Image (tube, rainbow, N blue to C red):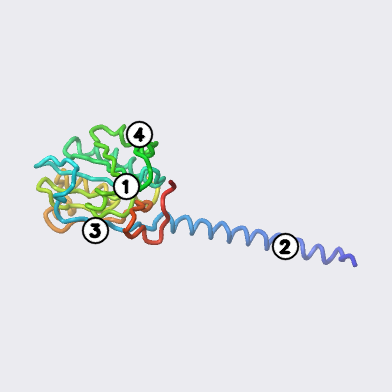
């Protein structure tokens, strides 16, 4: 049985409308899922209140020290390194910076020397350290790539958090501003709290993939 012309004239616009509405709903759902992923923080560090005595990372007495922990293949951390470059420029040599690249068990040291390593190495004055099996990361209580920890000139924890506004995104953010303010002692509310409790912000990145520790809350692991 063939359909009548009148029926076809009725169904074709309705079908087109249904397809357009379905497409719009799928796009909206995809955009929401992407936004949720971008603003979903990783597990915050349980950093020691004072510089860990067992750490092999060099710390210059009397100088603030920033430790940035990174997974060598975390795509989100590329944005963190972009913000680190701005942070180093803004602090004008008043800050010691170490980027700690965690090497998961079973991977060679050369595996860590990928594009993120090269990006970090291009930032003036930044020290790069390999961290096989995340031994140093454990000492600093870190779980998420992109975790920044600022210790003041006396070795007390002053800041713990991320330095990007979202996962894989660069731009103005409270973490970078807080570190710059505390290092330069600018006359802001953040700087005035420099001797109070550590300032904290969310950290956005993949899990550091440390065996025996919790991973990023609700997040994914970095590619290996």
Q: Which residue is mark 1?
A: 172
Q: Which residue is mark 2?
A: 15
Tag 2 secondary structure: helix
Q: Which residue is mark 4?
A: 118
Mark found first going from the N terminus, 3 or 2 = 2
The Cα atoms of the two marked residues, 2 and 1, are separated by 45 Å
Give the percent coordinates (x, y) of residue 196: 13, 57
Mark found first going from the N terminus, 3 or 4 = 3
Q: Residues within 10 Å of mark 3 (few under 14, many from 20)?
A: few
Q: Check whether the beta carbons of the residues at disc 2 and disc 4 lie within 8 A of each other.
A: no
- Judged left or right of residue 67, residue 81 is right
Give the percent coordinates (x, y) of residue 50: 14, 53
Give the numbered dot on residue 46. 3
* Viewer-side residue, 61 vs 21: 61
Between marks 4 and 1 in the image, the one whose residue lies nearer the viewer: 4
* Viewer-side residue, 54 vs 10: 54
């Amino acid at each position: 049985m063939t359909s009548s012309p009148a029926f076809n004239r009725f169904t074709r616009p309705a079908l087109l409308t249904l397809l357009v509405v379905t497409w719009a709903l799928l796009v909206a759902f995809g955009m929401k899922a992407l936004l949720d992923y971008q603003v979903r923080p990783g597990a915050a560090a349980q950093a020691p209140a004072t510089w860990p005595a067992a750490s092999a990372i060099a710390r210059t007495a009397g100088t603030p020290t920033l430790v940035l922990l990174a997974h060598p293949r975390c795509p989100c951390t590329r944005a963190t390194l972009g913000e680190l470059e701005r942070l180093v420029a803004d602090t004008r040599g008043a800050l010691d910076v170490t980027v700690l690249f965690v090497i998961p068990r079973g991977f060679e040291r050369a595996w860590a020397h990928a594009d993120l390593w090269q990006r970090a190495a291009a930032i003036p004055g930044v020290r790069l350290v390999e961290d096989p099996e995340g031994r140093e990361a454990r000492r600093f209580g870190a779980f998420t790539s992109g975790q920044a920890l600022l210790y003041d000139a006396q070795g007390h924890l002053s800041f713990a958090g991320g330095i990007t506004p979202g996962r894989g995104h660069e731009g103005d953010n409270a973490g970078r501003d807080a570190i710059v303010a505390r290092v330069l002692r600018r006359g802001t509310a953040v700087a005035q709290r420099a001797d109070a409790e550590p300032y904290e912000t969310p950290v956005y990145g993949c899990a550091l993939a440390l065996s025996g520790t919790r991973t990023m809350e609700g997040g994914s692991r970095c590619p290996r």
